[in-house]
Image (cartoon, grey):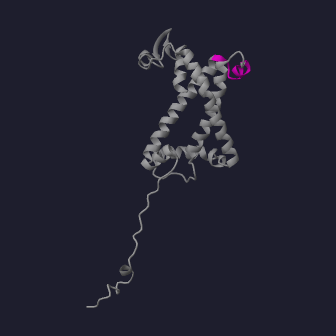
């Protein structure tokens, strides 16, 4: 969806830094579009973006329903001390603090991040509808603060996904290869030391091969 969103964004590449009407910095430089052959693909981008939006929405809806009915939401949503403990988790990840606050399935930072990503997904769907059909869904567009503000929110949420993905992958890699492998494959490999079976002579050192000296 991010890839097809770039095709749409190219049609109105408005974000950057300008001073007195002169563009100083563009969010995406011209060479970026030339390298990936993005220009002149607006219709293709809109078609793919709207198609994969359904997968994005259905996948998120199924996850939310499962989280609610399975009771997993209890381990997911932030608690009253989560924001305070999240700062301590950050200090631990930066190797400034040695100890980490006690945690269960998720620590405080993970609770906040995983809850935020669900809210971000909901925001992307709502703002996406607002900018895709601003006339038909005029009331959604109005709730989002208008077309231009909805587009800014939609774009900002996309940047948030990229940052979330990069930070998440780096943390998983730093946690170890086994953890990274379990995230990709969906299961964890636990290595155990094989047991050495004892022979009868090992059990009773007095018993030999039946011969006596």
- Viewer-closest of 133 and 140: 133
Residue at 28% across, 91% down: 212
Numbered range of the magenta stretch: 138-147
* Residue 57 image offset from top left, x and y in percent: 64, 32
Q: Nearer the viewer, residue 140 or 179?
A: 179
Question: Vertical placement of 198 versus 3: above or below?
Answer: below
Could you tell whether 208 is left or right of 126 in the image?
A: left
Q: Which x, y percent locates residue 168?
A: 50, 39
Question: Can the viewer see residue 5 in this picture?
Answer: yes
| Residue, far front | 210
Task: Say if 180 sits above or below 52 in the image.
Answer: below
The residue at the far top in this view is 21
Residue 176 shows up from this direction: no
Q: Quadrant of residue 146?
A: top right
Foreground residue among 109 and 167: 167
Q: Determine which quarter of the picture holds residue 123.
A: top right
Horizontal and vertical percent for residue 173? 43, 43
Residue drawn where x is 35% and y is 84% of the image:
205
Mainly helix, strand or loop, the magenta region? helix
Q: On the rendered image, what quadrant is the N terminus found in?
A: top right
Q: Residue furthest right?
A: 139
Q: Residue at x 62, y 40 (%)?
A: 115
Image-based side of 210 in relation to 92, left or right: left
Q: Is residue 48 magenta?
A: no
Q: Quadrant of the C terminus?
A: bottom left
- Report the residue at 49% width, 43% height from top: 184
* 106 vs 196, nearest the viewer: 196
Residue 52 appears at what percent x and percent y?
59, 27
Picture mark count:
0
The single residue placed furthest to the left in the displayed view is 213
């Amino acid at each position: 969806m991010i890839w097809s969103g770039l095709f749409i964004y190219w049609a109105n590449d408005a974000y950057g830094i300008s001073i007195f009407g002169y563009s100083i910095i563009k969010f995406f430089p011209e060479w970026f579009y030339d390298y990936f052959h993005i220009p002149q693909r607006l219709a293709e981008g809109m078609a793919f973006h709207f198609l994969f939006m359904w997968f994005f929405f259905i996948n998120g809806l199924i996850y939310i329903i499962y989280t609610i009915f399975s009771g997993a939401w209890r381990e997911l949503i932030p608690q009253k001390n989560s924001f305070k403990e999240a700062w301590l988790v950050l200090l631990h990840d930066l190797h400034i603090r040695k100890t980490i606050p006690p945690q269960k399935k998720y620590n405080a930072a993970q609770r906040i991040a995983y809850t935020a990503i669900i809210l971000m997904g909901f925001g992307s769907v709502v703002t996406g509808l607002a900018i895709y059909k601003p006339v038909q869904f005029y009331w959604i567009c109005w709730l989002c603060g208008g077309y231009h503000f909805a587009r800014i929110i939609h774009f900002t949420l996309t940047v948030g996904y990229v940052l979330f993905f990069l930070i998440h992958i780096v943390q998983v890699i730093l946690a170890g290869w086994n953890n990274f492998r379990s995230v990709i494959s969906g299961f964890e490999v636990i290595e155990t030391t094989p047991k050495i079976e004892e022979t009868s002579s090992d059990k009773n050192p007095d018993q030999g091969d039946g011969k006596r000296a």
